[in-house]
Image (cartoon, helix red, strand yellow):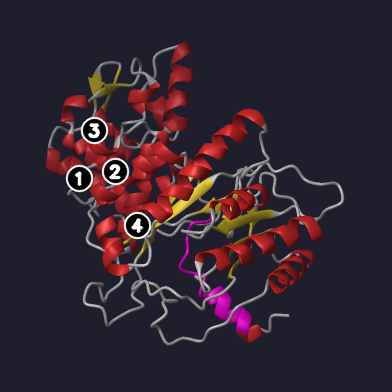
């Protein structure tokens, strides 16, 4: 059984992996089991019905054979080491679940001996939970690059979600800072999983990896621009049908390597990348529209505002005639608001008062729209920029549990 000291080591070592949030799993429960993964989330996430739920986030081992320079668990780092057995992890999960501490598990591991040995331990843990303990709850498993593909496919039959973390946005940086990892060793299993996942959706829905796969990139440990990162993100979505790409601002854990920054990377940069990711996935933007390949996102404005300022030829947009796909490109108008507008104008032309009643963020939208052919904003670009700067600085404040989600920043699912 894991004592408190070992548990603290393994849970603290897992905190740098952010590639976990709501599960969206539809795994079928067994009548004799415990727990429930359906429509649940993880890691203190809010589900669509408003519930806040949690999971146990832990490493199987932090005794790593690799020496990735950005990682706190690298072989050359002098930290306490420990390894849990599959039985210890299972016992912990079941006892925590019965005490209502958790509703699921996020299980990762450092490379213990070699990739295959590590993957065997992870898979055996999940197998025990599913088959011996009859645990129906959500399980997110961290995949191990270079492990036997058969182990990875078997893991996909047992887990709800798997993530193979790219970590660094280019092969050059990977060779420099994590020479024991290769681009191929990470992308190949992602490709195999994507193929099996598509087949499962068409033939036997819900059996193989019902919540899909994700990945994570560390932002700022290497010199790649935001434009490069956004293009890679779009490519990953297109090629591997990922559910999410997560971004993690680099936190220094190694001050002896001259190739690594010695200060934390701004959380604002991470926030802007999540907003750009939202535009890719839901707003119909392409990576090329958002940013040039060697450019970085502005910290002063969210990416959609930045795009709007660069493309005055697209504006103003007429509220009473523009299709929804044009309305969502207006700063301050998101999907919910766009469809409210399209639905409401069937019964008559909309006025500014109508838009205010719909809770459109008018401070952002006013300079990019016309209403019944009339423009109510200003053509002074410095004034427009100043207005957007003020409203965006307000949007970056800490959210309350009771914040109106329809007016929240894109990372939380609101209007941008």
Q: Residues within 10 Å of mark 3 (few under 14, many from 20)?
A: many
Q: In the rendered image, which quarter is residue 201 located in?
A: top right
Residue at the spot of label 3: 367
Location of residue 407 with respect to 398 vertically, above or below: above
- Marked residue nearer the N-terminal end (3 or 1): 1
Residue closest to the eye, 69 or 10: 69
- Marked residue nearer the N-terminal end (4 or 1): 4
Residue at the spot of label 4: 270
Start-end of magenta stretch: 6-20
Is residue 31 shown to the viewer in this render? yes
- Marked residue nearer the N-terminal end (1 or 2): 2
Residue at the spot of label 2: 231
Residue closest to the eye, 117 or 144: 117
Location of residue 36 with respect to 179 vertically, above or below: above
Label ID, residue 380? none
Q: CA distance from mark 1 to mark 2?
A: 7 Å
Q: Pointer 2 and pointer 3: residues touching (CB < 8 Å)?
A: no
- Marked residue nearer the N-terminal end (4 or 2): 2
Helix, strand or loop status at disc 1: loop
Q: Residues within 10 Å of mark 2 (few under 14, many from 20)?
A: some
Residue 243 lies, in percent from the top left, at 49, 43
């Amino acid at each position: 059984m894991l004592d408190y000291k070992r548990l603290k080591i393994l849970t603290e070592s897992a905190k740098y992996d952010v590639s976990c949030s709501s599960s969206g799993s539809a795994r079928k429960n067994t009548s004799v089991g415990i727990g429930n993964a359906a429509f649940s989330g993880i890691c203190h996430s809010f589900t669509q019905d408003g519930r806040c739920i949690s999971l146990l986030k832990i490493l199987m081992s932090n005794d790593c054979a690799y020496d990735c320079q950005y990682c706190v668990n690298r072989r050359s780092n002098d930290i306490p080491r420990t390894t849990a057995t599959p039985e210890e992890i299972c016992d912990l999960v079941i006892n925590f679940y019965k005490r209502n501490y958790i509703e699921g598990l996020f299980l990762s591991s450092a490379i213990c001996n070699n990739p295959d040995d590590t993957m065997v331990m992870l898979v055996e843990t999940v197998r025990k939970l599913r088959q011996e303990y009859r645990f129906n709850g959500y399980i997110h498993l961290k995949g191990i690059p270079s492990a036997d593909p058969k182990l990875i496919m078997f893991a996909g039959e047992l887990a709800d979600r798997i993530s193979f973390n790219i970590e660094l946005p280019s092969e050059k940086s990977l060779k420099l800072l994590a020479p024991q990892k290769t681009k191929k060793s990470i992308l190949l299993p992602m490709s195999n999983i994507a193929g099996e996942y598509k087949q499962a959706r068409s033939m036997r829905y819900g059996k193989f990896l019902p919540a899909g796969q994700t990945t994570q990139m560390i932002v700022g440990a290497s010199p790649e621009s935001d434009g490069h990162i956004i293009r890679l993100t779009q490519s990953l979505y297109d090629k591997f049908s990922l559910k999410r790409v997560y971004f993690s601002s680099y936190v220094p854990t190694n001050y002896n390597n001259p190739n690594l920054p010695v200060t934390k990377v701004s959380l604002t940069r991470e926030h802007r990348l999540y907003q750009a990711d939202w535009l890719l996935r839901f707003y119909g933007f392409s990576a090329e529209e958002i940013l040039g390949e060697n450019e970085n996102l502005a910290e002063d404005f969210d990416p959609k505002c930045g795009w709007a300022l660069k493309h005055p030829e697209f504006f103003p947009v007429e509220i009473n005639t523009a299709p929804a796909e044009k309305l969502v490109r207006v700063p301050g108008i998101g999907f919910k608001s766009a469809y409210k507008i399209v639905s409401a104008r069937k019964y008559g032309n909309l006025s500014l008062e109508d838009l205010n009643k719909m809770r459109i963020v008018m401070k952002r939208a006013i300079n990019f729209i016309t209403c019944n052919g009339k423009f109510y904003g200003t053509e002074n670009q410095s004034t427009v920029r100043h207005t957007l700067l003020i409203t965006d600085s307000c949007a970056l404040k800490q959210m309350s549990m009771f914040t109106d989600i329809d007016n929240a920043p894109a990372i939380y699912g609101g209007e941008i």
